[in-house]
Image (spheres, grey):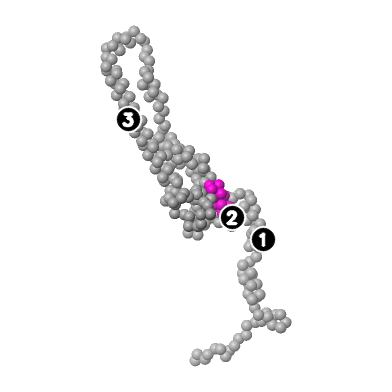
Amino acid sequence: RLRGFATAHIWACPPLKGDDYIFYAKPEDQKTPKDGRLRQWYIDMLVECQKRDIVGKVTNMYDLYFANERLDATAVPYHEGDYFPGEAENIIKDIEEGGSKKGSSSSKKSKKKRNSSSGSGNKSKSKNKGRSGTRSGSTDDEEKMEVVEPSYKEGGRDQVMVKLGDTIQPMKESFIVAFLNWKGAKEEDLVVPKEIAEYRAKAKKESGESEKNPSEEASSSRTKSRKRDANGNPRTASFDSSSIKDLV
């Protein structure tokens, strides 16, 4: 916070066996905490930080980035070893493979359609000669059923964000974002629950920070530290002229 960091991102996920984790350097009877217990530990820690005016608003990654339809995948912060980089790469790979499969299947359908229309030749023409209208074949119906989502540039949603958001929504409470109270923090990022604000005001009042002058407090402490005479009055420092050497 003192170095200018604006947010703290916490992934409340218990590690797996084999991970480089401090708990596994301890005895076996100290088990790894469950998801809910670990998440609650982080929340309790952040609430204490809110009481000390170190942390402001506490939210989660889904509400902050994925609920906003205007944001794309570049808005999501990526940290080394985090959940999102690996999952985003898998989603991009699936989208690219799905697009290539769809393109190959559509090209096969169009090729098959051309071959069938050229093979029927005059037979189809004579058969449909007396008809006033035409009817779409099964291939055309299948092509119409394939709904193509508009791209992000065309005003649609970023498909990576859609799929990634759908994945993390059930466990969004495990992806915690805490806004730090640093010198450049925005006012809306420092909003805390009513209970926290009341606790801060009460603690400030009890400590007397808003009423007592720091200079008066320092003067009072110096007076208390002075030695006193037999009557209980603070002794004044005596001037010993013999300690000064003649510099002439």
244 or 144, which is in the foreground? 144
Q: Are circles 1 and 2 on residues that touch, CB within 8 Å?
A: no
Is residue 56 visible in the rendered structure shown here?
no
Q: Residue furthest right?
A: 231
Label 1 secondary element: helix
- The residue at 42%/39% (across/down) is 160
Residue 39 in magenta stretch: yes
| CA gap, disc 1 and disc 3 | 73 Å
**Residue 62 versus residue 129 in the image, above or below:** below
Q: Which residue is mark 1?
A: 206
77 or 85, which is in the foreground? 85
Local packing at callout 2 (Cα closer than 10 Å; few below 14, some 14-19, many 20+) is some
- Tell me the magenta residue range: 34-46
In primary-sequence order, the first of circles 1 and 3 is 3
Label 2 secondary element: helix
Local packing at callout 1 (Cα closer than 10 Å; few below 14, some 14-19, many 20+) is few
The three-letter amino acid code for the residue at tag 3 is Ser
Residue 80, percent from left and from top: 42, 51
Side of 89 where 8 appears, left or right: right
Q: In the image, which disc is placed on residue 185?
A: none
Q: Which residue is mark 3?
A: 104
Residue 98, percent from left and from top: 37, 34
The three-letter amino acid code for the residue at tag 2 is Glu
Q: In the image, which disc is placed on residue 48?
A: 2
| CA gap, disc 1 and disc 2 | 18 Å
Residue 14 in magenta stretch: no
The three-letter amino acid code for the residue at tag 1 is Glu
| CA gap, disc 3 and disc 2 | 57 Å
- The residue at 51%/42% (across/down) is 171
Residue 126, percent from left and from top: 30, 9
Classify residue 200 by image quadrant.
bottom right
Local packing at callout 3 (Cα closer than 10 Å; few below 14, some 14-19, many 20+) is few
